Image: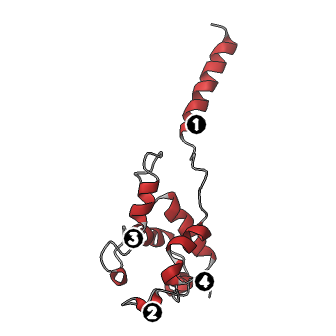
Amino acid sequence: MRPSWIALLVGGSFGLVAAGCVDRRTDEATGAVLYRRYCAACHGLAGRGDGPLAASLRQPPKDLTALARNAGGTFREADVMMTIDGRRLVAEHGPRDMPVWGAVFAQQHVGEPFAAYGPTLDARALADYLRTIQRD
């Protein structure tokens, strides 16, 4: 075999492997979109715990714009993601069917590379968005 063919085969093989690691979903939502879809009904559009369903809840929703302030000025990303995806129990949320969106997010990513390990891309996107709405 000629060296150029070997390079082509090796390069093509790497390309096929890399293609398997790409998220092929075309409807990938941003953190802001996910927040509006899954969180705003309780936590409010601005994240201050004043969503339209807030008054009907036993415990008022947390002001998500104060997460960093309430944690001594540090946005605790890992804690936020574990709260979103249900790995961290939050008493105010009641049982795991809070709704804890982690199960929903995990179901949407079944079969994707690395989907079984750690937080979903959706929990990551939501945490990244929540970081942007923090206030002093």
**Which one is closest to the eye, mark 2 or mark 1?**
2
Q: CA distance from mark 4 to mark 2?
A: 16 Å
- The residue that disc 1 covers is 18
Residue 104 showing in the rendered view: yes
Question: Is label 3 in contact with label 2 (beta carbons under 8 Å)?
Answer: no
Q: CA distance from mark 3 to mark 2?
A: 19 Å
Q: Position of residue 60 (x, y in %)?
A: 43, 90
> What's the amino acid at mark 4?
Ala
Circle 4 SS class: loop
- Display coloring: secondary structure
Q: CA distance from mark 2 to mark 1?
A: 48 Å
Q: Would you call the spot at circle 4 few (<14 residues within 10 Å), some (14-19), or many (20 or more)?
A: some
- The residue that disc 2 covers is 55
Q: CA distance from mark 1 to mark 4?
A: 39 Å
**Which one is closest to the eye, mark 4 or mark 2?**
2
Q: Is residue 34 left or right of residue 86?
A: right
Residue 104's place in the image compared with 40, above or below, is above
